[in-house]
Image (tube, rainbow, N blue to C red):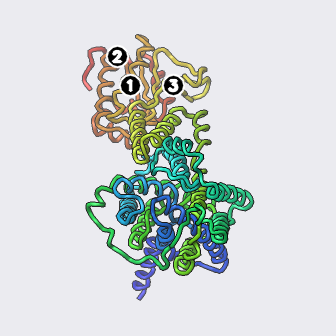
Amino acid sequence: MSAFFTQVEKLKTHIKKVVPIADTLGSYNKNLLKGDLNAGVTVGIMLIPQGMAYAILAGLPPVYGLYASIIPLVIYALFGTSRQLAVGPVAMVSLLVVAGVGEFAEVGSARFIQLAILTALGVGLVQFLMGLFRMGFLVNFLSHPVLSGFTSAAALIIGASQIKNLTGLDLPRTNQVQEIAIETFRRFTEIEPITAAIGIGSIAAIVLIRKWKRTFPSALVVVVVGTVITALFGLNQHGVAIVGDIPTGLPEFSLEFLNLSDARILLPTVLIISLVSYMESIAVAKAIANKHGYKVDANKELIALGAANIGGSFFQAFPTTGGFSRTAVNDQSGANTTIASIISAVIIALTVLFLTPLFYYLPSAVLAAIIMVAVAGLFDSSEMKHLWKTDKRDLAMLLVTFVATLALGIEEGIAIGVLLSLILVIYSSTKPHSTELGHLGETQNYRNIHRYTEAVVEDDILIYRFDSSLYFANAENFQDTLYANMDRHGDDLKLVILDASAINSIDSTGKHVLMEVVKDLKEKGVELFIAGAIGPVRDKLKTCGLQEAMGDDHFFFDVSDAVSYYKEVPNRIAKRYSPTQTNV
C-alpha cells in the first residue's frame, strides 16, 4: 500500500512540474484571488482595444485580435512559469506577421488570414521543440544591440504605417518609412481634419491618463469616447473610417489553414517570429520574476509559449507572446498567479460573445492612436546614448541593424543584425585578450602590466596569460601573441610561465600548438611552466602526452609558486636543457 501512495506522490510531483498551475491551485487562497481578479479584469479590459488594434496592424480584421486573446492566454496559464506575464497580441509580432505573410498574399484577404494562422502554428511548433530539446540558448544569437536596433526601427515603421489611419490619407501600403513620409508631406492638404482630430486627441488622452494612473484602462476610455462621439454625430458619414461589423461568437475550432507547401514558404518568417517573440517574452518575464524573488525556467517558458501558439492556431489566433506594457500593468494591478490570465481570457470571451456590436462605430483613428502610443516606448534612444559612452562597437552593430531594417525591410534587417552578431562573435573568439603579467611590489600578486604600470617585469621571465579557451579558432593567435611577447625579452629570456587560469578548455588543435611551443622553447633553451591550469585541462594535457614531455614539476597551482620554484635554483635551465634537446 505504501508503494502505491509513493507512486501517487511521484505522479503529483511530475504533474506539478509539467503543469505548474497544479502547484498553484494546491495552495491557492482568497488573498491570492483578490489580486488575480483585479489584475485579470484590468488587463482584460486593456486587451480589448489593444487586441483589435494589433490585429489591424497585423493586416487582419479586428476580431482576430480578440480571438488571439482567449485560448493562448488559457494555455499559457496552465504551463507558464511566470506568474505575472501577460500573453497576447503584441505590436512587434504583428508587424512581423504583416511583413512576412504579406509577401505571399494580399493583406486582409482570406488567404492572408489562413497564412497568418498557419504562422502561429509554425511559431508554436518551433518554440515547443526548442523548449523540449532545451535549445533556449539559440536566442543568444539575438544580441541586445541587434534587438534594440531592430525594435527601434520597427517602432518607426509601425508608427509610420498608422499615419494613414490617423490622418485619413489614402497612402500606399509599404514598410519604407521614407516613402510614407514623402507621400504624407506631398498630400498634406488632403488630411481628413475630423479623423486627424480624433487620432491626435486620442494620443493626447492616452498619454495624459497614463501619467495620472498607469493601471487605468486609458485605451478603453478613448475607445468608448471615440465610439460614442462618432455614433452620436454620424462622423462616419463625414469621412471618418470606422471598424464596422465585428462577428459575434467564440472562435471555432478549425484545421482549414493546414497546408504543408504554405508552411515551407513561411519558414523564414516563422523562425524570426519564434526568436523575437521569445526574446521579448523572456526579457520581461525575468525582470518581473527578479522583482518578486522567484525564477522562471527559460525552456519551460518556450514550451508554454509554444503550446499557447499551437492551441491558439486551431481557434483562429495569429502569433502571440508576452507583452511589456500589459505585463507591467498586470503586475502593478496585483497579479499573484497565472489565474489572472485566465480571468483576462474570460473577459475577452464575454466580449466576443455579447459586446462586439458595440464597436461598430469605433474609429480606425483611435486604434491607430493606441498602436502609436504603445510602440513609442520601443524606440530605444537611451540605449544608443549608453552605448555611445560605453561600447562603440555595440553601438555600430545597433545602428547597422537599425538602418538595414529601415532601408531593406523587417526580415532583412534582423537577418543582417544576427549575421553581424555571429561575425563579431567569431572574430572576437579568434582574437581573445592576452597579456604579460608583472609582479606587484612585496605581494605575491601578478597583474597586467598595461593596467598596473608599477608591476615589475624581469628580463629572464615572461609571465603570459591567455584569457580564453584554447581551440582551433584562436590557437594561431595564441602562438603569435606569445612569441611577440617573447621577442620583447630578447636573448635574456630563460623562462616562460603560462598563466592558464583563464583557459577552461582545450581541443586537439590547442594541444598540438602547445606541443609546438614546448619544442620551440626547448630549441631556444627556454623553459616552460604552466600555472593555474584547471583539472579538466590538465587531464587533456596528460592524455596527449604533453605533461609527461614537460614533466610533472612544470605544473603549478599559481604563478607565484612557479616563480619561486624557478628562483630556488637559478641555473636549472642550463642544467636541464641544451639547444640540442628537441624531442617532446
Q: Nearer the viewer, mark 2 or mark 3?
A: 3
Dot 2 or dot 3, earlier in sequence: 3
Instruction: Say if residue 554 shows up in the picture.
Output: yes
Dot 3 or dot 1, earlier in sequence: 3
Quarter of the image for residue 574 reads top left
Q: Nearer the viewer, mark 3 or mark 1?
A: 3
**Residue pictured at 52% horizontal, 80% vertical:** 353
* Kind of element beneath mark 2: loop
* In the image, residue 232 above or below residue 29: above
- Disc 3 residue type? Leu
**Residue pictured at 63% horizontal, 67% vertical:** 230
Quickly name the residue at label 1. Answer: 528
Location of the N terminus (image quadrant): bottom left
* Kind of element beneath mark 1: strand
Location of the C terminus (image quadrant): top left
Residue at the top extreme, as displayed: 491
**Residue pictured at 58% horizontal, 22% vertical:** 455
Residue 525, disc: 2
For label 2, the crowd category at 10 Å Cα-Cα, with few meaning under 14, some 14 to 19 and many 20 or more, is: many
Which is nearer the eye, 446 or 163? 163
Q: Percent x, y for residue 260? A: 26, 63
* In the image, residue 174 above or below residue 113: above
Quarter of the image for residue 445 reads top right
Instruction: Say if residue 333 shows up in the picture.
Output: no
* In the image, residue 255 above or below residue 442: below
